[in-house]
């Protein structure tokens, strides 16, 4: 039930900022272990996605390969 509510909250266009959505979710489920695990996974996925979207410094990569 909580996950359904979270999905609806995340899809809510009125809540435009990811930070606002994240804060609302963390407040809502502060005492719910199962949903906290879900949020931890969601945060991990977001960190990986942000890392993968960063531009690659090809000069640094090439210099590292030569060493």
Image: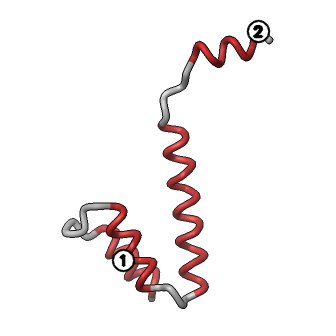
Q: Which residue is mark 2?
A: 66
Residue 62's quadrant in the figure?
top right
Horizontal relation, residue 23 to residue 52: left or right? left
Q: Which residue is mark 1?
A: 24
Could you tell me residue 27's position as x and y percent? 42, 82
Residue at the right extreme, as displayed: 67
Residue at image point 59% right, 13% down: 59
The image quadrant where one finds the C terminus is top right
CA gap, disc 2 and disc 1? 48 Å
The image quadrant where one finds the N terminus is bottom left
Residue at the left extreme, as displayed: 14
The image shows residue 58, relative to residue 56, as above or below, that is: above
Could you tell me residue 66's position as x and y percent? 76, 9
Residue at image point 74% right, 14% down: 65
The image shows residue 42, relative to residue 23, as above or below, that is: above
Disc 1, SS: helix
């Amino acid at each position: 039930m909580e996950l359904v509510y979270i999905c609806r909250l995340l899809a809510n266009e009125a809540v435009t900022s990811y930070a606002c959505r994240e804060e609302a979710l963390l407040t809502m489920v502060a005492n719910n272990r199962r949903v906290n695990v879900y949020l931890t996974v969601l945060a991990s996925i977001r960190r990986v996605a942000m890392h993968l979207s960063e531009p690659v410094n090809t000069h640094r990569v090439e210099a590292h390969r030569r060493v």
